[in-house]
Image: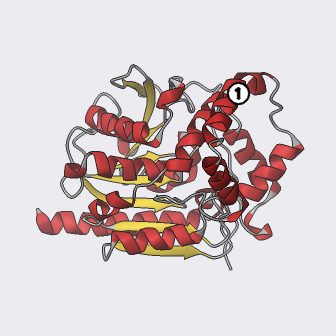
């Protein structure tokens, strides 16, 4: 029997960011908001990049770095933590809509690493789109994995095939066959600003969709947590949401998984995840190979880091302990 998760309270965007936060400007001019945590504040922009081990967190689609609040509390006493808002999310700057892609977020992650973790071993943690960002980085910068990147945790994510099954999968295949999918995506982005203008945040309908799509069994979701997660996900503007939506239809990073096989990887999947079903996690672990450990959480949905922090924190600490042991033996 699992314990109830701690009361979830996330800092709002109306609260000033921590004083040692910084902005990393990408090569295409987008400012990415980065925060630091850990012993003595995690070193921040003014020091600490040479910490013995740095953990970098990559959040999910339409969320922001605040989604890691519970894991931040669990790890900050022992590790330097780096958390960043992906382009168009949270405190990061708006993105040109054509650049709202997983390919681009992989490049962004590389530039965050180069700017704030220029040396020393790194463990990457990604939830949903954040995990896809890590896979894109593995394809783009394979030389980092096994040298700089020494471990990874992938939560409720997938390497591809997000619309291969179900009603949505059939609709996408029909749309592609008829040549209508590009028209649909273009129309979605064209009308996104109008939808944003009349968008009703905090609605009962939005809460139902949040509960249905992001949480698992009835026991997995208490009403207070659903409201907090709904508020978090609705902060991202609809034009950004619509722009990123297209990239999920074509997301395919299976060829990057052998690169991840060079390092210890923990894959966490929920049995009741409706967005990235557990089958994706099983395939990830299988294709990464012997270096991967698979943890399937009964009853959990997509927001496993919110609803099952005990499981996720334990997975993080176990992998970090394994990495530290390897570093000690190697050094």
Q: Residue furthest right?
A: 204
The picture quadrant where one finds residue 217 is bottom right
The image's colouring method is secondary structure
Q: Quick check: can you spot residue 148?
A: no
Check the image and name the residue furthest to the bottom: 1
> Is residue 28 visible from the viewing direction of this image?
yes
State whether residue 265 is above or below residue 31: below
In this figure, which residue is indicated by the disc labeled 1? Answer: 192
Quick one: label 1, few (<14), some, or many (20+) residues within 10 Å? some
Which one is in front, 187 or 179?
Answer: 179
Residue at the spot 64% in from the left edge and 65% down from the top edge: 165
Image-based side of 290 in relation to 220, left or right? left
Question: From what the image shows, is residue 293 above or below residue 260?
Answer: below
Question: Percent position (x, y) of residue 114?
Answer: 26, 35
Relative image position of residue 234 (x, y in whole percent): 71, 37
- Where residue 93 appears, as percent x and y from the top left, is 51, 23
The extreme top residue here reads 29
- Report which quarter residue 6 is drawn in: bottom right
Q: Residue furthest front?
A: 178
Question: How far across and how far down the image is residue 190, in percent?
Answer: 68, 25
User: Image point 36% across, 26% down: which residue?
Assistant: 26
* In the image: residue 15, left or right of residue 136: right
- Which quadrant would the C terminus be assigned to in this image? bottom left
Please tell me whether mark 1 sits on a helix, a strand or a loop. helix
Q: Quadrant of residue 106?
A: top left
Residue at image position (68%, 73%) is: 299
Q: Is residue 139 above or below residue 197?
A: below
Q: Decide which of 295, 143 is in the foreground and name it.
A: 143
């Amino acid at each position: 029997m699992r314990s109830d998760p701690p009361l979830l309270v996330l800092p709002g965007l109306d609260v000033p960011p921590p004083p040692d936060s910084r902005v990393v400007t990408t090569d295409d001019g987008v400012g990415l908001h980065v925060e630091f945590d850990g012993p003595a504040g995690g070193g921040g922009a003014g020091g600490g990049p040479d910490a013995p081990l740095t953990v970098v967190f990559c959040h999910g689609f339409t969320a922001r770095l605040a989604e890691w609040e519970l894991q931040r509390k669990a790890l900050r006493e022992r590790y330097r933590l780096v958390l960043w808002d992906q382009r168009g999310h949270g405190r990061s700057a708006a993105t040109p809509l054509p650049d709202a892609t997983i390919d681009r977020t992989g490049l962004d992650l590389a530039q965050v690493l180069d700017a704030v973790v220029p040396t020393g071993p790194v463990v990457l943690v990604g939830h949903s789109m954040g995990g896809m960002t890590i896979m894109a980085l593995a394809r783009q910068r394979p030389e980092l994995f096994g040298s700089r990147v020494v471990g990874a945790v992938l939560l409720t994510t997938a390497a591809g095939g997000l619309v291969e099954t179900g009603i949505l999968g059939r609709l996408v295949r029909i749309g592609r066959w008829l040549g209508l999918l590009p028209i649909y995506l273009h129309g979605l982005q064209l009308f996104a600003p109008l939808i944003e203008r009349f968008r009703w945040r905090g609605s009962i309908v939005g809460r139902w969709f949040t509960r249905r799509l992001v949480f698992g069994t009835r026991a997995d979701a208490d009403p207070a947590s659903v409201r907090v997660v709904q508020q978090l996900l609705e902060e991202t503007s609809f034009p950004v949401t619509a722009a990123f939506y297209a990239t999920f239809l074509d997301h395919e990073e299976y060829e990057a998984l052998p690169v991840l096989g060079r390092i210890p990887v923990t894959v966490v999947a929920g049995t009741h995840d409706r967005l990235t079903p557990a089958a994706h996690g099983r395939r990830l672990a299988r294709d990464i190979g012997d270096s991967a450990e698979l943890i399937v959480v009964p009853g959990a949905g997509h927001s496993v880091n919110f609803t099952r922090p005990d499981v996720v924190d334990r997975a993080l600490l176990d992998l970090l302990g394994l990495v530290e042991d390897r570093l000690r033996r190697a050094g």
